[in-house]
Image: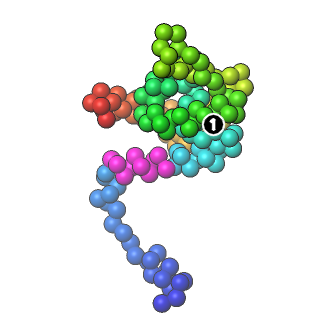
Amino acid sequence: MGRSAMAQAASAQVVDESGIEGLLGYNLKRAYMIVRDDFRRQVEQSVLSPRAFSVLTLIAETPGMTQSDVARRLGIERSGLVSIIDDLEARGLASRCAVPGDRRSQALVATPEGCALHQQTLERVHAHERALLAVLSPAEQAQFLTLLRKFRAAHQEEGA
């Protein structure tokens, strides 16, 4: 069977997704993939990956957070955070500072360049999210985010 015949046969097959469509994990993953892919198309052009944007956002909005605090807040391994901070620092977007009284910890601060890039990127992120959420009414958008936060908060308390 040739490639085009196989493609036609595959497209002719109807897969019953009624079971999978009802699964939380499946729907969350698919929604995440849509958000991630659109972020990459619309926002990452500003030279910040989603993770780097998240780190820069936290340190721009909360100067002086330690690396451990940032890792905990974002739910990522401290070792994975180090490479992101190294990159932000090498690009002049963030700096590490000593924490008075704790020689093992380092506080993170966004540089003026980092704050400017964060603000530019934040505007693009808001536009990207508005476009994605446009399929929902304003009330549905508010409810959607409220429910996501409630879900997250309940499971973060469990250590998940």
Locate residue 158, reporting x and y percent: 27, 30
Q: Give the residue number, with chain letter if any, for mark 1.
A: 87
- Which region is colored magenta? 24-33
Q: Is residue 5 visible?
A: yes
Question: For residue 49, which quarter of the picture?
Answer: top right
> Residue 65, relative to residue 42: is it above or below?
above
Q: Residue at x 55, y 30 (%)?
A: 55
Left or right of 30? Residue 157 is left
For this orientation, the residue located farthest to the left is: 158
Is residue 104 positioned above or below 53 on the image?
above
Horizontal side, residue 23 vs residue 72: left or right: left
Q: Is residue 149 above or below residue 13?
A: above
At 53% across and 34% down in the image, what residue appears?
Answer: 82
Type of amino acid under label 1: Asp
Principal secondary structure, stretch drawn in magenta: helix
Identify the residue at image location x=53%, y=21%.
106
The residue shown at (55%, 42%) is: 132
> Is residue 115 rendered to the left or right of residue 146?
right
Q: How many marks?
A: 1
Quarter of the figure with residue 64:
top right
Q: In what quadrant of the picture does the C terminus appear?
A: top left
- Looking at the picture, tell me which residue is in the foreground, 97 or 48: 97
The answer, for residue 134, to whether it is visible in the render is: no
Above or below 49: residue 61: above
Say which of 101 and 22 sits in front. Answer: 101
Q: Is residue 6 magenta?
A: no
- Whole-percent x and y of residue 149? 39, 30
